[in-house]
Image (cartoon, grey):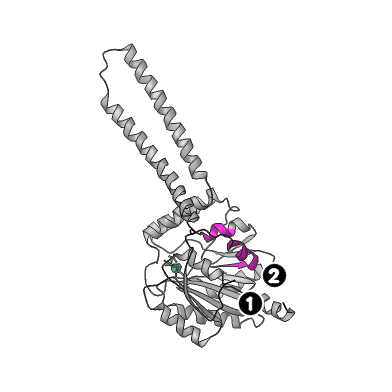
Amino acid sequence: MSDRKREEIKNLLSFVIPCYRSEKTIEKVYREIVETVAQKPEYTYEVITVNDCSPDGVLTVLRKLAAGDPCFKVINLAKNFGKHSAMMAGFSYVRGEYIVNLDDDCQCPMDRLWELVDPVANEGYDCATAAYPRKKESLWKRMGSQVNNSMVNMLIEPPKGVVLENFAVIKRFVCDEILKYRNPYPYVAGLVLRATHNIKMVPMEEREREDGNASGFTLIKSVELFANGLTSFSVKPLRIALILGVLFAFLGFVYGLIIIIRRLCNSGIPMGYSSIMAVQLFSSGVIMLILGMIGEYLGRIYISLNNSPQYVVRETMNTEPAE
Ligand code: UDP
Ligand code: MG
């Protein structure tokens, strides 16, 4: 590679934006990127948008923007694969040294971009992420992210206090590392943490959604994401299941002993159907839970062996097929 080419790539910021139901906001996000990058002439940009088979007219807007700017790239997915798969698709097309992740709904505070780029470009960090105080979102969504965060903490064990948000900059080598994950259920925060712990948290406020739409994350999508994070990175849940199973078997055994002894000491005690039923129901519930968890892992192994794709690209604009 020529020095000039390398220099160009070194100062290239690759913005990766998964798009879903954002026909009203994506153009504004793009304009804001162009304005912000223009503040520092040493940097150039490419915007890689991934249409996650959005049901609204966002693809038309993306096509229009791509026609007006060769640095605006579009990857059109064949189905709705979810945010994280869409991000993986975007990552596989980046050319820049620094990759900026952001959402399509103007919620990421673009005016604070350089506070995320500088630590990665000049201070030796591998990743810099926004750190939002408290999310402006519905109660169940907040509870969902709480559960998700504590799950990430338990399973992936990030450095203390590190939470990856939807506005973050990563170095190219982290992106290349993330792309080695080929399974159909990616979870990007986990993949970043698998590659590096050298992460800077930059406190900033998330903006309100501008289009007034509700979040594109339905309850079901949040549950799916939770299951991905839960089972993709660790077999700890299986171990917890095992411990639970042992614990309840032990309790059942002790309770059984107590019943037998009481019955032997006092033959007047009638046979206790209710207690039998209670124990029966409880233990079969635990067994079902454990079987379900094992089934989840088995299903994932099966699907991975099946070579189910992370995403399928229908067409691209302004970009070469990924290597
Ligand atoms: N997203 C996606 N596919 C989906 C749902 C969402 O690519 O099926 C993208 C969406 O375009 C946005 C990001 O995920 O860039 C976050 O979505 P949203 O703003 O709805 O969620 P929230 O901000 O509430 O986390
Ligand atoms: Mg959002």
Type of amino acid under label 1: Leu
Q: Is residue 282 left or right of residue 72?
A: left
Q: Residue at x 41, y 78 (%)?
A: 58
Q: Residue at x 41, y 75 (%)?
A: 22
Q: Quadrant of residue 244?
A: top left
Q: Secondary structure at mark 1?
A: strand
Residue 103 or 241: which is nearer the viewer? 241
Q: Residue at x 70, y 77 (%)?
A: 6
- C-alpha span from label 1 to label 2: 14 Å
Q: Quadrant of residue 269?
A: top left
State the residue position of label 2: 122
In the image as oriented, which residue stretches furthest toward the front? 306
Type of amino acid under label 2: Asn
Task: Tell which circle, 1 or 2, labels the residue nearer the N-terminal end.
Answer: 1
* Residue 322 image point, x, y percent: 57, 72
State the residue position of label 1: 12
| Mark 1 or mark 2, whichever is nearer to me | 1
**Taking the image as drawn, is residue 205 in sight?**
no
**Is residue 171 one of those drawn in magenta?**
yes
Tell me whether the residue at label 1 lies in contact with that at label 2, contact meaning CB atoms closer than 8 angstroms: no
Question: Magenta residues?
Answer: 167-192
Task: Examine the rendered structure and indicate whether residue 261 appears above or below residue 171.
Answer: above
Q: Residues within 10 Å of mark 2 (few under 14, many from 20)?
A: few
